[in-house]
Image (spheres, rainbow, N blue to C red):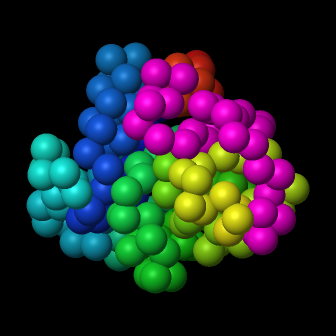
Amino acid sequence: MSKVACVLTDMFEDSEYTSPEKAFKDAGHEVVVIGTEKNQEVEGKNGEAKVKVDVGIADAKPEEYDALFIPGGFSPDILRADDRFVEFSKHYMLKNKPVFAICHGPQLLITADILYGRKVTGFKSILVDLKHAGANVFDEEVVVCGNLVTSRTPDDLEAFNRESVNQLS
């Protein structure tokens, strides 16, 4: 069983949290939500999901988790303005731990400046940002590059969930 850190704040894409979270739990893994403040309730941009933050970023230690999960929506763009989330995310790439980022999720990795030379995908509006970050960008439902799994939209969740869970096996 792996312990998966999920960085999250308001305005996340509801299904891009709920679907992978269910896939991780169904496969026997634990998902721990890391947010701005412990016990804060964050809400998806569609109002379909409300999630309680398990650990505040001030108390989060990346070495305590086996993998990182970054749902899309506006959440990653909000989180990347906070250096604590950027450094937390960077740890997983530098330590070659599994990282799962869907839709706008890679924005946090762009800010961490750790995508140079990596194969990735993401939501259409961030593809040029990924290219400027030095990534090799593909328009595919899921791209796996070593420890990194990326996908474009909620339409890609089946492939994203499959490849993410495979990384934890």
* Residue 103 within the segment the image draws in magenta: no
- Confirm whether residue 165 shows in the render: no
Q: Nearer the viewer, residue 73 or 10?
A: 73
Classify residue 45 as left or right of residue 100.
Answer: left
Q: Quadrant of the N terminus?
A: top left
Q: Nearer the viewer, residue 128 or 130?
A: 128
Q: Residue furthest front?
A: 124
Classify residue 44 as left or right of residue 24.
Answer: left
- Residue 132 in the image, given as x and y percentages of width and height: 78, 71
Q: Quadrant of residue 9?
A: bottom left
Q: Quadrant of residue 12?
A: bottom left
Classify residue 105 as left or right of residue 146.
Answer: left
- Confirm whether residue 25 shows in the render: yes
Q: Nearer the viewer, residue 144 or 60?
A: 144
Q: Nearer the viewer, residue 132 or 28?
A: 132
Q: Is residue 162 above or below residue 135?
A: above
Classify residue 2 as left or right of residue 18.
Answer: right
At 62% from the left edge and 74% from the top edge, which residue is drawn? 111
Q: Residue furthest right?
A: 117
At 55% from the left edge and 66% from the top edge, which residue is drawn? 108
- Residue 166 in the image, given as x and y percentages of width and height: 59, 20
Q: Is residue 78 above or below residue 98?
A: below
| Region rendered in magenta | 131-159
Q: Is residue 61 above or below residue 70?
A: below
At 76% from the left edge and 69% from the top edge, which residue is drawn? 133
